[in-house]
Amino acid sequence: GFNKVVLPFTRFNRQADPATMGIDIVAGGRNKKKRRTAPKSENVYLKLLVKLYSFLERRTDAGFNKVVLRRLYQSKQHRAPISISRLARYVAGQEDKIAVQVGTITDDPRLFEVPKLRVCALRFTETARARILKAGGEVMTFDQLALLRPTGTDTVLLRGPKTQREANKHFGAPGVPHSSAKPYVRSKGRKFEKARGRRNSRGYKA
């Protein structure tokens, strides 16, 4: 009878048995990195910052520039805002350094006295900017920071809390025992998701 000849798998012969095939190192490689290598945003000012920090990352040995560049690529969800009250708490005792946040600085009306701060961020809300400047502080952009601190010396690199978004409160199954996931309801009141399973007087309380 006719016997089928199976050729050995080489880079020139790709007709090997699919059951024994592995990763095609030649074509696909082993690059499994899933992080962004460029921003998705079309903002021209952000693209200019990426151009600036990719140069600094390439031409300096500073890890600071690597981190800033990576964060410039990130989505808005991963560039969580930080309030001036949290900012003041983080830089307490090192006010002579520049606080750096690759994201937004927001105001916090619960903070009565804003300390004198030097802050660099992608953007500031109007009230946050006004309060920092009124306290004798300084606000700057990343191109100004690159001239002052090209390697990130005497800076404090900060990040806002990523899980404080409203959407995060709804993650999980609401209503099941020991779950603290927030349900999506029309209103908060006696008539809305407050009956069976939520009160002892209505069957049981989970």
Image (tube, helix red, strand yellow):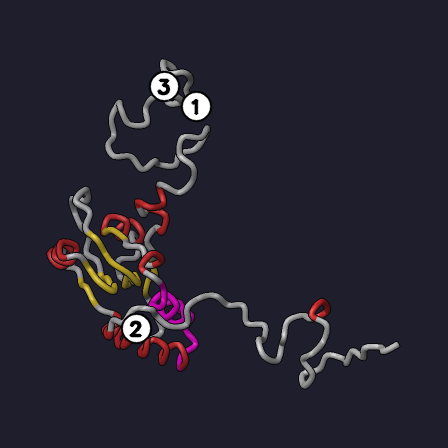
Which image quarter: residue 48? Answer: bottom left
Considering only vertical position in the picture, is 175 above or below 99?
above
Q: Amino acid at mark 3?
A: Arg
Answer with mark 1 or mark 3, whichever residue precedes in sequence: 3
Residue depicted at 78% across the width and 78% down the height: 6
Query: Mark 1: which amino acid?
Result: Ala
175 or 87, nearer to the observer: 175
- Ranked by sequence position, the earlier of labels 2 and 1 is 2
Q: Which residues are magenta?
A: 59-74
Residue under numbered circle 1: 206
Which residue is at the front of the view, 156 or 165? 165
For disc 1, the neighbor class at 10 Å (few under 14, some 14 to 19, many from 20) is: few
Q: Which residue is rendered at x = 69% and y = 78% of the image?
A: 15
On screen, residue 107 versus residue 66, left or right, reads: left
User: Decide: marks 1, 3 in contact (CB < 8 A)?
Assistant: no
Q: Position of residue 12 (x, y in %)?
A: 67, 86
Question: Label 2 neighbourhood size at 10 Å, few (<14), some (14-19), many (20+)?
Answer: some
Instruction: Pick whichever, 55 or 91, lies toward us.
Output: 55
Q: Quadrant of residue 188?
A: top left
**Which-is-in-front pick, marks 2 and 3?**
3
Query: Badge 3 is on which residue?
Result: 199
